[in-house]
Every structure is written in structure tokens, then in C-alpha cells.
Amino acid sequence: MNITEFVERSIGRWRSQRSVHHLAFSHFEAVQSVIDIVALSLDDQAVLDLCKSYNIDAQTVVSPFRMSWEGQSDWDENEVLKGSCILVPVPDPDHPNRGQLLRDQGYAETMAAVGTYYLTEDETFVLVTGYDRAAAEEKIWFINPNVRCRVSLIKTSANTGVVTASFSSEIRQEIKNKP
Amino acid sequence: MNITEFVERSIGRWRSQRSVHHLAFSHFEAVQSVIDIVALSLDDQAVLDLCKSYNIDAQTVVSPFRMSWEGQSDWDENEVLKGSCILVPVPDPDHPNRGQLLRDQGYAETMAAVGTYYLTEDETFVLVTGYDRAAAEEKIWFINPNVRCRVSLIKTSANTGVVTASFSSEIRQEIKNKP
């Protein structure tokens, strides 16, 4: 599976159940949300702007998409978790199963970021993103066309400690039209 | 990584946080438990008996171990979840990263079972076990020597539906002496 197929399979509306394990104090947090993943065209202005901000040739990117989410956590049921961001894969020309993933700031993310991804032989998408003081590692794989799993880890920057581990099971609700 | 290294890294006492997602009705269940994984010797009588019951030559097995657990679910805080079973890997002589995993009935498992396992290039242990009316798929990988993650899926026997998806984050508490 390459990144284009992975993004194609991800397009749609997903109902997500997410459990967050705060490891230091054995706390469980439960989040329920709806996630929309929508394909963007390669000449979408937001995609071109994001490429420009990272000095990436827009001819080298594939399958850009927007991810939006809206949900609630059992930590604070009055707060609505809501956000959206644009994600742009830049495959490595020498290794089609690897590449960079650009992400814009969005209106909920604190900062733009570039992660590196790869797809394993058993079709798991792995994304590693380094931040100033932490690193995030995410694994996503499909159980069938309508169910996918996502495990996210936040590690300290030394990469030795894991601060939170979270697991999402996502069930497809509806296929969105592609642009 | 082969199965011997994987078992060696697993030996010890783990504090486990487990979230179970009951997908059909979007329910979250939280389980906290302590898991002990103890190496057994190849001439342990229980190991020999398990091999015999499956007609497996005891010379072909490696790294047998016992797994015991004791915990509590937030579904029923008065009930103690407790069990133990013996697990015996039988590597495929032609493919060292694959094999069978024998499991005895234990005192909490409803039935003995044989699963097939493989280890991926990115060091994830994958175990698939078929039952009469369902199939279980489990993935386990280490984040560092003292933290591991486990995702378990229970599917209907047709393999199309996923009934529950669960995620455990496991933190090492104490190294047990090997026999």
C-alpha cells in the first residue's frame, strides 16, 4: 500500500472512540468524536500555501487532505474539542513507502509541523513528528474498509519516557464526495 | 527480533491499563490489572503436557511462559478478573519470524487454543487465533524496554465485523527471576 491508497481509504466521515491513558497517574480519559477526512485538490490554495511555507515543490506532493474533528471528553463534558488541519504527503522519490507529511497550524493545533511517515509491509501507516520538547508517534491501520485503529504516543524529547498513550477505534459513517 | 527475544523482553511484572471499546454501542470499559509473565523451563511438566495434547514434539518449542493477571473493570468493581495460562511458541522451522502459539485452558480461559503468530519488520508481534464463532487478533510492540502496547480485536467468524477493540498500555514494575 502506498500513501495515495492509504489516503483514499481514509476519506470519509468517521465516528471515533478514543481512550487516552495518562501513564504517570494511571488515568483513563474517554473521548467521542466525529472526524471528517476530505480530499483536497493539488491546486487548492491552502495546499499551495503550505508547500510554499516549507519550500516544498508543489509538484512533488500527492493526495492532500483536510481532517476536521469535533468531540467531547469525559474530563470536561462542557468543553467541545474541535479543530481542523490540512495534511500534505510528500513521498520520498527513492522510497515510495516513505515520505514527509506537512501539517498546517489549523485552528486547534498549536503549531505547524512536519512529520516523517512510512508504511509497513503489513499496511500500517506510521508517523513520527518531533516537537521542541516532545515527540509524537502514531500508527494507523485498517481492520476492514470501514474500521480503522489508531495508536498515538506522546514521548518526552529524550524519547525515553512515554507521557500518554491513546487508542482510537474509528468506524466509517458516510463516504464524502471527493472534489 | 525473533520469538525468543520477544518473550525475553516480556518477562516481568506489568501494570496494565486497558480500554475496551464495545463498538456496536460506543461503550468504553476501563480495566486496571497486574500481569505477571514468567519464563518456564522446557522440561516443565505443564509444558510437556500441553505439547502432548497438541501432538507437538517438545523438542521443537522455545521460550514457554506463564501469564497470570489480576485486575478490576469499571463495569463491575466488585468482580476480580483473575486468570493464568501457559503459552508455548512453536517456531516454523522455515520462517523463524512465524510460528504457532499453543495455549492451555488455564483457569479463566474457556478453552485451549492454537494461534499463529508472526513478527513484523518493525518488531510488532501479531497473533491470530480462530475460535468456533470468532477470531481474535492481537498486536503487541515495545515502546521502550519498560513500556509495551497491545491492541486486541475480536471479530465475528466471518471476519467482517469487529465486535470489540481493546488497547492496553503496560508498564514494567519489577523484573522476575527466570527459573
Image: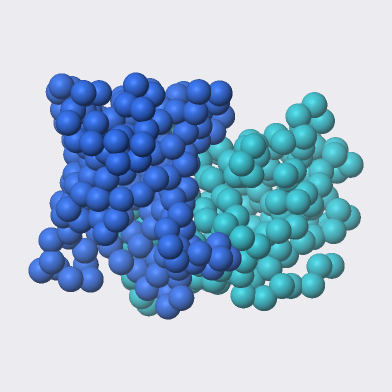
Chain colours: A cyan, B blue
Is residue A164 visible to the viewer in this orientation of the structure? no
Front residue of this view, candidates B43 and A146: B43
Q: Compared to B124, does A16 lie above or below?
A: below
Q: Where is residue B67 drawn, in percent x and y?
A: 23, 41
On screen, B35 above or below B154?
above
Q: Is residue A63 left or right of residue A153?
A: right
Q: Nearer the viewer, residue B157 or B2?
A: B157
Expressed as whole percent of the image width and height from the top left, the position of residue B161 reads: 54, 68
Which residue of the protein is positioned furthest toward the left in this rendering?
Answer: B78
Q: Tell which of A70 and A169 is nearer to you.
A: A169
Residue A175 seen in render: yes
Image point (71%, 72%), residue name: A175
- Residue at 21% across / 63% down in the picture? B73
Q: In this image, B50 relative to B78: left or right?
A: right
Quadrant containing the C terminus of chain B in the rendered view: top left
Please name whichever residue, A26 or B24, is drawn nearer the observer in this view of the structure: B24
* Residue at the (74%, 72%) spot, across then down: A176
Lateral position of residue A29 relative to residue A89, left or right:
left
Query: Does residue A170 appear to the left or right of A74 in the view shown?
Result: right
Query: Is A6 placed above or below B89 here?
Result: below
Residue B154: x %, y % from top left = 44, 61
* Residue B122 locus on image (x, y percent): 53, 31
Q: How many marks?
A: 0
Q: Residue at x 44, y 66 (%)?
A: B133
